[in-house]
Image: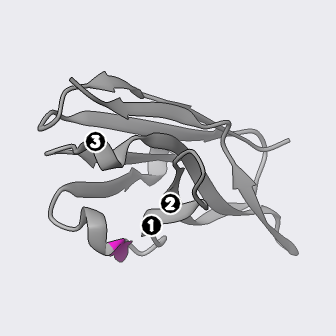
Amino acid sequence: QVRLVESGGGLVQPGGSLRLSCSASGTFFSINTMGWYRQAPGKQRELVAEIAGGGSTNYADSVKGRFTISRDSSKYTVYLQMNSLKPEDTAVYYCEATIKPSAYAVNNYWGQGTQVTVST
């Protein structure tokens, strides 16, 4: 069974930084795209950033220049470095990955979410 486990959320002041991590565990054939989404209270879940297996990245306009997504394929882990955080970045952040549990299947998996709060 494939699991995604996130860590690194917390409370930070505006202008501060946090680093989120998400690791995949279990038995699988390969991992394709990994990404981060977020959902603020009363809002829809939105894409923050994603990184393909080859390393190409995609960011939401609201985080470009402030957030950096990276991955360590040897550890099945994706990171989100968040700098210059703003109160509007407050949300539950979810890790998502497109994983092939076998050579003949592909599924989307989600982590349990980690709270990021930017406040004085």
Q: CA distance from mark 1 to mark 3?
A: 22 Å
| Magenta-colored span | 56-60
User: Residue 7's spot in the image, x, y percent?
Assistant: 48, 28
The residue wearing badge 3 is 87
Name the residue carrying label 1: 50
Q: Is residue 6 above or below residue 30?
A: above
Rendered residue at 15%/64% (across/down): 65
What distance separates the C-alpha of mark 1 from that of mark 2?
4 Å
Residue visible at 68% across and 36% down?
Answer: 112
User: What kind of residue is marked 3?
Assistant: Pro
On whether residue 75 falls in the magenta region, the answer is no
In the picture, the disc for residue 35 is: 2
Which of disc 2 and disc 3 is earlier in sequence?
A: 2
Task: Characterize the local packing of mark 2: few (<14), some (14-19) or many (20 or more) Cα atoms within 10 angstroms.
Answer: many
Crowding near the residue tagged with mark 3, few <14, some 14–19, many ≥20 C-alpha atoms within 10 Å: some
Give the mark, 1 or 2, whose residue is nearer the N terminus.
2
Is 39 in front, or is 81?
39
Q: Quadrant of the C terminus?
A: top left
**Cβ atoms under marks 1 and 2 closer than 8 Å:** yes
Q: What residue lies at 56% left-to-right and 45% top-to-bottom? A: 41
CA–CA distance in space, label 3 to label 2: 21 Å
Q: Residue furthest front?
A: 42
The kind of secondary structure element at disc 3 is: helix
Q: Is residue 43 left or right of residue 54?
A: right
Q: Name the residue nearer the viewer: 51 or 105.
A: 51
Give the crowd class for mark 1: few <14, some 14-19, many >=20 residues within 10 Å.
Answer: many
For discs 1 and 3, the disc positioned in front in the rendered view: 3
Q: Is residue 7 above or below residue 3?
A: above
Q: Quadrant of residue 105?
A: bottom right
Q: Nearer the viewer, mark 3 or mark 2?
A: 3
Q: Say which amino acid is labelled 2.
A: Gly
